[in-house]
C-alpha cells in the first residue's frame, strides 16, 4: 500500500475541498451540504461555467475554479462521477440568471449524472448546455470520436470556456466557443505505473517494472498496446506522429502545448519530453503559442504523462490569452 | 401463498434487500475488479444504506413513494454510472406506482417495465451490450409472462430469469461504459451491474419467502 499523507480515508474528499477553499482566501466556498465549490463573487447576468467529475485527479477538476475560469465544480467521490443532487446544488449556487454551461470529461457516469441534473435544472427554469470533452486520441478511432475519453485536454477547453463565459453575453455564444476549443484539442498519453485509490488503498492496474502502456486511461482503462520501456525520444516521436495525424495538425498551424504528469512523473522528465516535442513541432512547421508543463490532470501517484495540443484561430487565441487565476492554472 | 404485499411489507422487503446488498458488497467488488474499477459493491452498499435510512425514517402513502425513495437515495448516495442507472430504475418505477397501496404482480411488472424503459433511455444500452439491461430485460419479460399470479409465485421466477440473464453476460463483449475499452478481455466475466440486478430481485423474492 502506498504511503499517503492522509487522515481517516473516509474524510479525504471533504478535507481536500476544505484545503482548496483555504487556498483561495475567500474567493471560493463550499456549497452547503454537498461536495461542490462555488466562487463567492459571480456577477448577476453572467453565463455560469460548471465543471466537475470524479475526485482524485487534482488539480482537475475543482482546481480550475477561479478568476476567468470555472464558477463552480461538482465533485464526485474518488474516481466516481458526482450525483445529480451535487451537480444541481452547484448549478443553483452559481446560476446568475443567464444559464449554466456544463463542461466535463466524456465518461458514461458523468454523462448520465450531468444529464439528469440538467433536466432537473431545466425544471427549475435554469438553462443548461453541455460540452463533453473527448480529447484522448487512443481511446477510440477517429470515426467514433464521441466515444473518446476526456483527459488533459480538459485544461485547454476549461481555460477557453472560462474566458468566454467571463466575456460573452449569452449561453449559446459561450457554448459555441467552448465547442470549438474542444473540437480543436487532442491528447495522447502513456502510463508506466499505477496510482492507488486513496480511500481503498488498491492500485488501479498492474504493469511490469520494464513495461509501459500506450494510451492507458487515467483510471487504468486499457490502452492500445503494452510494450517494453524505450528511450523517451523514440516514444515521444511515436506519440507525436499519432496526435498530429489525428486532428490533423498541419504545417503553418499555431498551437498551445501542454505536457502533463499523471502523478509521479517528474518535471525533469517532462522537460526532456518537451524538448523532443518542440523538435518535432519545429520540423513540422507548427508554431507553439504557449507551453504549459506540470501536474494538471493526474491519477494520484500514477507514473506517466500526456501531451495535449489545441489548434488556435484568432478567436480561441484571444480567449486563451486572457489572464486567469486558479489553483491549477494561472496566466498573467 | 402471498397474493400481494401490504405497504408495510413492501417497506420491509426493501429493508431486507438493503441489508443483504450490503452483505454481498465484497463479492460485487470482486466481480467489478475483473472488468471495472472494483468499487461496484461498495457503491451498491452505500446506495442501499442510504435507502434503508429513508425507509426507516420516512412516511409513505403508496408503494410508489417507497420505491421512489429507494431510487432517489441510490442516485444521490452512489454517484457514478451505477447510481444514475439504478436510481433511474427505481425512480421511474416509483413514479408509475404513485397510486398503488399494495405490491402486487401487476406492480412488479410496472416496476420492471417502466424501469427498463427509463434505464435504456438514460444509458442507451441494448440487450447484449453486457450491462444490467441483460438481467433486467429478461426479468421484465418473465414478469409479464407470469401475469396476474400471486407475488410469491412470480418473484422467484423473475429472480431466476434475472440470474440467467446475469450469467449470460459472461459470454458477451462489453459495449458500454468503462468496460467497453476491454473489448474481448471482458469475455468470461459477468457484468457487475447485471449481478446486482439479479441480487436485488433475488432478495425481494427471498423476503417474500420468509412470510
Image: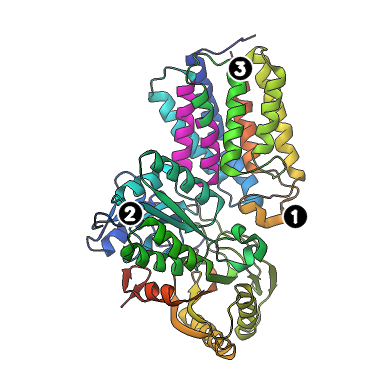
Chain identifier of the residue bearing label 2 in the image: A
Q: Secondary structure at mark 3?
A: helix
A226, above or below A284, in the image: above
Residue A331 visible, this angle: yes
- Residue A247 x, y percent position in the rendering: 60, 73
Q: Which mark is residue A37?
A: 2
Residue with the mark numbered 3:
B106
At 71% from the left and 51% from the top, the residue drawn is B186
At 71% from the left and 55% from the top, the residue drawn is B183
Q: Residues within 10 Å of mark 3 (few under 14, many from 20)?
A: some
Residue with the mark numbered 1:
B184
Measure how far apart labels 3 and 1 are at the Cα level: 39 Å
Marks 3 and 1 close (CB-CB < 8 Å): no
In the image, the segment drawn in magenta is B64-91
State which quarter of the image contains the C terminus of chain A: bottom left
Measure how far apart labels 2 and 1 are at the Cα level: 40 Å
At 47% from the left and 65% from the top, the residue drawn is A154
Indicate which label's residue lies in the foreground, 2 or 3: 3
Amino acid at each position: 500500500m502506498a504511503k499517503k499523507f492522509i487522515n481517516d480515508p473516509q474524510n479525504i474528499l471533504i478535507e481536500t475541498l476544505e484545503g482548496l477553499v483555504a487556498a483561495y482566501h475567500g474567493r471560493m466556498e463550499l456549497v452547503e451540504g454537498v461536495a461542490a465549490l462555488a466562487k463567492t463573487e459571480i456577477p448577476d447576468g453572467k453565463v455560469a461555467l460548471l465543471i466537475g467529475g470524479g475526485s482524485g485527479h487534482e488539480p482537475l477538476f475543482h482546481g480550475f475554479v477561479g478568476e476567468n475560469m470555472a464558477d463552480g465544480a461538482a465533485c464526485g467521490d474518488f474516481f466516481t462521477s458526482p450525483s445529480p443532487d451535487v451537480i444541481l446544488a452547484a448549478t443553483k449556487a452559481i446560476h446568475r440568471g443567464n444559464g449554466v454551461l456544463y463542461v466535463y470529461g466524456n465518461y458514461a457516469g458523468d454523462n448520465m449524472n450531468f444529464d439528469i441534473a440538467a433536466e432537473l435544472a431545466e425544471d427549475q427554469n435554469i438553462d443548461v448546455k453541455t460540452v463533453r470533452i473527448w480529447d484522448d486520441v487512443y481511446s477510440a478511432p477517429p470515426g467514433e470520436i464521441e466515444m473518446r475519453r476526456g483527459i488533459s485536454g480538459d485544461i485547454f477547453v476549461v481555460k477557453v470556456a472560462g474566458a468566454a463565459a467571463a466575456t460573452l453575453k449569452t449561453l449559446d455564444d459561450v457554448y459555441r466557443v467552448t465547442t470549438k476549443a474542444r473540437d480543436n484539442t487532442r491528447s495522447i498519453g502513456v502510463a508506466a505505473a499505477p496510482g492507488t485509490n486513496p480511500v481503498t488503498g488498491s492500485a488501479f492496474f498492474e504493469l511490469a517494472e520494464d513495461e509501459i502502456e500506450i494510451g492507458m486511461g487515467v483510471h487504468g482503462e486499457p490502452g492500445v498496446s503494452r510494450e517494453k520501456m524505450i528511450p523517451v525520444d523514440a516514444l515521444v516521436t511515436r506519440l507525436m506522429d499519432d496526435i498530429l495525424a489525428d486532428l490533423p495538425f498541419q504545417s503553418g498551424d499555431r498551437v498551445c502545448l501542454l505536457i502533463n504528469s499523471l502523478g509521479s512523473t517528474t518535471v525533469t522528465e517532462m522537460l526532456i519530453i518537451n524538448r523532443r516535442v518542440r523538435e518535432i513541432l519545429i520540423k513540422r512547421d507548427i508554431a507553439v503559442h504557449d507551453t504549459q508543463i506540470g501536474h494538471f490532470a493526474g491519477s494520484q501517484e500514477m507514473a506517466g504523462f500526456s501531451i495535449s495540443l489545441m489548434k488556435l484561430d484568432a478567436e480561441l487565441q484571444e480567449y486563451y490569452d486572457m489572464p486567469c487565476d486558479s489553483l491549477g492554472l494561472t496566466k498573467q | 401463498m402471498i397474493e400481494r404485499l401490504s405497504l408495510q411489507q413492501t417497506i420491509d422487503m426493501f429493508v431486507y434487500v438493503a441489508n443483504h446488498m450490503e452483505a454481498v458488497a465484497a463479492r460485487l467488488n470482486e466481480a467489478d475488479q475483473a472488468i471495472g474499477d472494483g468499487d461496484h459493491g461498495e457503491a451498491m452498499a452505500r446506495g442501499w444504506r442510504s435507502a434503508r435510512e429513508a425507509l426507516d425514517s420516512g412516511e409513505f402513502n403508496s408503494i410508489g413513494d417507497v420505491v421512489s425513495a429507494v431510487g432517489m437515495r441510490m442516485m444521490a448516495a452512489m454517484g457514478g454510472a451505477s447510481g444514475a442507472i439504478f436510481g433511474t430504475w427505481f425512480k421511474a418505477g416509483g413514479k408509475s406506482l404513485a397510486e398503488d397501496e399494495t405490491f402486487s404482480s401487476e406492480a412488479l411488472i410496472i416496476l420492471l417495465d417502466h424501469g427498463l424503459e427509463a434505464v435504456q433511455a438514460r444509458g442507451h444500452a441494448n440487450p447484449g451490450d453486457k450491462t444490467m439491461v441483460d438481467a433486467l430485460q429478461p426479468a421484465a419479460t418473465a414478469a409479464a409472462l407470469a401475469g396476474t399470479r400471486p407475488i410469491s409465485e412470480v418473484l422467484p421466477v423473475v429472480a431466476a430469469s434475472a440470474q440467467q440473464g446475469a450469467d449470460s453476460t459472461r459470454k458477451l463483449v462489453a459495449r458500454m461504459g468503462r468496460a467497453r475499452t476491454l473489448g474481448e478481455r471482458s469475455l468470461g466475466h459477468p457484468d457487475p451491474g447485471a449481478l446486482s440486478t439479479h441480487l436485488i430481485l433475488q432478495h425481494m423474492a427471498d423476503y417474500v419467502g420468509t412470510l
